[in-house]
Amino acid sequence: MQEFGLTLEQTRIMFSYQYHLVLADIEYETDYNIKSLKRQWLSQWKESTELFLKSQINGEKDFDFHLITNFDLLTTSAKNNFSNKQNLYVMLLEVILFKPYYPLGNSNDEKFKNLKIADEDKLTNKLKYFARTLDVDSSLVTRFKSNYNEAIKEIKGGWNPWFIGVIGAVALAILAAFFTPAIAALLAPILVPGLSGAAAVSAVLAALGGGAIAAGGLGMAGGFAVIVGGGAILGASAGVGVGALFSQSPDAALTQAAKLEVVMKEILHTQQDIRKAQEIIKEQRQAIRSLEDQLDKLLLDKEKNSKKIDNLKQAIDYLKKALERNQDLLVSYTKLTNEYVISPICSKCFHLNKNFEVGKPRSCKAFTRIPDEIWKGDNDHQRPYPSDKGIIFKSIDEQ
């Protein structure tokens, strides 16, 4: 899903808004000692984030990898670089869900471990202010938080004391689970080529915490993709990097699946783009298949990989539940709007009858009425199917 990708400059803008969010929290902090610790954390996070951005420069000699610390300049830059409303919303989603003070993989992590946001309500108001300066409805802030919190709860399953409290508690509990130096070291060669040692670990943790992953490093072509970006983090092309992350912590899959659900809701209810929603669902299916392939490889040595196997199974389970929820969202929306749903499989097949009409049987060279299983994308029809006359899927691009 390339359309969810952020350019390097847009990614710098995203990190810069997070920087200003932490500045606001420091301003609201009343304890002088804690305020001082928060300033130290922000300084180290800024340095690590800039290291990450610097490591991604590829032929862009004029790119300034430093965060934008002047808020007026940041607002102007955001307006100039986000002509696409969808990318702006995706960037804001990451800023809204950002929770600072997580470990950065250095010796100071211990003294920062008890830091928390001073006043959630005031910080929410600051986020609404960010939205208004970008000519975005400020109600988006509470809507994003509410939808994300609901998705986390439903995908994980059932009510649990772990879910009680503000979204910050939920997010921080997950951050603690998978933002660790061990995972950062695992992803460093992919995400921060050219960096090594403590600097690489710190840069990766800063990037993951901020919500950005180098799309090129995970097999996607060009630009950046925030973690929420369907195909970039959840897609089959993400490959080994994502599988490694999820095999270390299934909660990583949980958070990204929840973000993707927020995006689905916005696409359907704000942009009313059924085709794009179908593409997201297709990417989720590909992601699950890709991770199942990686699981098969781990199963070749069950004893050695037992922990990774359990984690990856849990991650796949989360993604399957998330997929079901997104499919239900699309079905509910199409029933409500009486729209004709485009098949994620058949719409890309050379054999589809291009003259089908709403309310008429969906047909192709293989079927007088295409089975629901294939039309909905549950079966990609790459292999023979009963009564298909020996005709299987053939890509339009192939033809």
Image (tube, grey):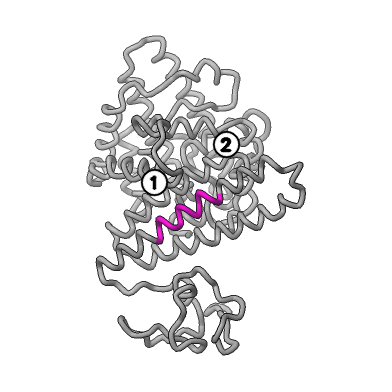
The picture places residue 76, in percent across and down from the top left corner, at: 31, 42
Lateral position of residue 117 relative to residue 305, left or right? left
Residue type at the position of mark 2: Val
Is tag 2's residue or tag 1's residue first in the polypeptide sequence? 1
Real-space Cα separation, disc 2 to disc 1, in angstroms: 26 Å
Q: Secondary structure at mark 2?
A: helix
Query: Does the stretch in magenta take in 323?
Result: yes
On-image quarter of the C terminus:
bottom right
Q: Which residues are magenta?
A: 316-327
Relative to residue 192, is residue 221 depicted above or below?
below
Checking the image for residue 204, the label placed there is: 2
On the image, which quarter does residue 22 sit in?
top left
Q: Secondary structure at mark 1?
A: helix
Residue at image position (61%, 41%) is 192
Residue at image position (33%, 37%) is 73
The residue carrying pointer 2 sits among few (fewer than 14), some (14 to 19) or many (20 or more) residues within 10 Å by Cα, namely many
Residue, disc 1: 151
Lateral position of residue 171 relative to residue 243, left or right? left
The picture places residue 368, in percent across and down from the top left corner, at: 45, 89
Residue 5 visible, this angle: no
The picture places residue 94, in percent across and down from the top left corner, at: 40, 42
Relative to residue 199, is residue 149 depicted above or below?
below
Checking the image for residue 141, the label placed there is: none
